Amino acid sequence: MRKKIVAGNWKMNNDEIESQRLINSIIEKKLDNNCEVYVSPSFPFLKDAIKLCDKTNIKVLAQNVSHEIEGAFTGDVSCKMLDSLEVKSVIIGHSERRTIFKEDNNMLLNKLKLCFKNNFQVFFCIGEDIDARKSEEQFFVIEDQLNKTVFQLENIDPNKLIIAYEPVWAIGTGLSATPNQAQEMHKFIREKFKNKFSESISEKLSIIYGGSVKPSSAKEIFAQNDVDGGLIGGASLKSNDFADIVNSI
Ligand code: PEP
């Protein structure tokens, strides 16, 4: 059985008190025990989050990590720093990092290597933009992103890697992929992992969908064979919506 996962990507939202309130409010909800649930406050509030989530089933996820070990990288946060807060899960390759902060495949590959070396769990985001989707090049784009990053690694541990398929045109737009579009792409990604690594790895790999998932759309998307959960942006900022999405798994 593959792990079912729902992770909130809070992005640059919530100050200290708001972050604490949201976590406490999520803790109070009755959440499906079969689902791994993650919250991702911004760096300054990770330590609070770890404390609040202690002895609960909710895990804490960082939104980013540096591609370097340490040194003259103003503003960056390293694996060692996250480790010292007991944060061991991180998002890499979010489309906002790729486009706004110009993180390229080389940098993402460095991040992957460092994270796995330091025993982190990685949520690795891939996704095509609207032009690629319109010109029906989405499979080519996804394969290319994988070839230049994860598939450069000799091996992967499916317990340490989660693929988040996030079509860029669906992120924050209110325009989710249809369940069929999600299933079709997740199946394609799983097949690529099978060809690159092994069937056993591909069958254990959790592939989650992200892009305008709402309580009203989550159930049908999560019901698809190759969809193992979701990475949730906007809807993760409201505890009721987030809980409803978790319980749609
Ligand atoms: C995201 O940013 O990862 C995301 C999926 O955002 P939203 O759910 O708001 O589309």
Image (spheres, rainbow, N blue to C red):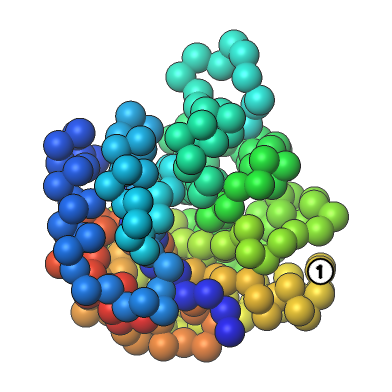
Residue 90's spot in the image, x, y percent? 51, 46
Residue 121 screen position, x and y as percent: 58, 53
Q: Residues within 10 Å of mark 1 (few under 14, many from 20)?
A: some
Instruction: Mark 1 and ligand 1: say if the CB distance to the nearest ligand atom is below 8 Å.
Output: no
At 75% from the left and 59% from the top, the residue drawn is: 156
Quadrant location, the C terminus: bottom left
In the rendered image, the vertical position of residue 160 relative to residue 51, given as above or below? below
Q: Amino acid at mark 1?
A: Phe
- The quadrant in which the N terminus is found is bottom right
Give the structural element (helix, strand or loop) at label 1: loop
- Residue annotated with mark 1: 197
* Residue that appears at 21% across and 60% down: 26
Q: Quadrant of residue 198?
A: bottom right
Please tell me whether residue 222 is drawn above or below residue 92 in the rendered image: below
> Which residue: 23% across, 60% down?
27
Is residue 105 among what the camera can see? Answer: no
Q: Position of residue 166 (x, y in %)?
A: 46, 61
Front in this rendered view, residue 46 or 161: 46
The total of numbered circles placed on residues is 1
Could you tell me which residue is drawn at 78 percent across and 80 percent down? 199
Left or right: 185 as drawn, with respect to 97: right
Q: Can you name the residue that lies furthest to the front here?
A: 55
Work out whether 120 lies above or below 128.
above
